[in-house]
Image (cartoon, rainbow, N blue to C red):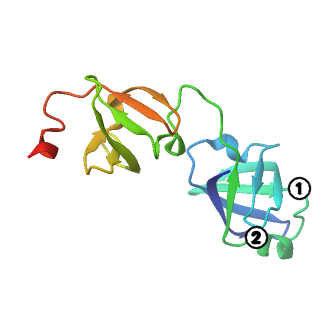
Amino acid sequence: MLEVGRLTRPHGVRGEVNVVLTSNRHERVAPGAVLTTPSGLALEVQASRPHKNGFIVRFAGVNDRESAEKLRNTVVSAEPIDDPDELWVHDLIGADVVDQDGVTRGRVVRLLENPASDLLELDSGALVPVRFIVEHVATEIIRVEVPDGLFDLDEV
């Protein structure tokens, strides 16, 4: 399960809840989607609509403000979405990065957000722009084609 958002506070008196997604995939709050709380409670989305920096969501079985209040500040998770055209952070972390010459440059320890291009931070300290990824096998290997000199600072 992946963390996809947070239920921040109730909205109105009919059990609706403000949801702020940490995912860019709005289908996480589409009718029929299921979000899970840390206690294992499954919340099925009945309806949702955009609101400010998130969504107003009605969940099955949450019919009044008191029920919605019990969900305040709850982190919610969901199953990973299978989309072969997307790179997912959980698939990149822990994978070995191999350059175009077959040299293993390190293991991905985290992803850093950057306006120009998100960066893979390697356990070697190197930073590799995500746009240089040409192939990957989830959590195992990431093949990159990088410009000459990108790893030269590591060798000094």
The mark found on residue 71 in the picture is 2
Q: Is residue 150 left or right of residue 109?
A: left
Q: Residues within 10 Å of mark 1 (few under 14, many from 20)?
A: some
Lower position in the chain sequence, tag 2 or tag 1: 1
Which residue is identified by label 1? 60
Q: Nearer the viewer, residue 19 or 85?
A: 85
Q: Is residue 119 visible?
A: no
Residue drawn where x is 90% and y is 65% of the image: 63
Q: Which structural element holds mark 1?
A: loop
| Above or below: residue 79 compared with residue 140 | below
Q: Which structural element holds mark 2?
A: loop
Residue drawn where x is 82% and y is 56% of the image: 43
- The x, y position of residue 21, in whole percent, is 60, 54
Q: Residues within 10 Å of mark 2 (few under 14, many from 20)?
A: many
Amino acid type at circle 1 is: Ala
Q: CA distance from mark 2 to mark 1?
A: 13 Å
The mark found on residue 17 in the picture is none
- The x, y position of residue 91, in whole percent, is 52, 40
Q: Which residue appears farthest toward the front when viewing the image? A: 103
Residue drawn where x is 24% and y is 28% of the image: 146
- The x, y position of residue 140, in whole percent, is 48, 36
Q: Nearer the viewer, residue 138 or 8?
A: 138
Amino acid type at circle 2 is: Leu
- The x, y position of residue 30, in whole percent, is 74, 43
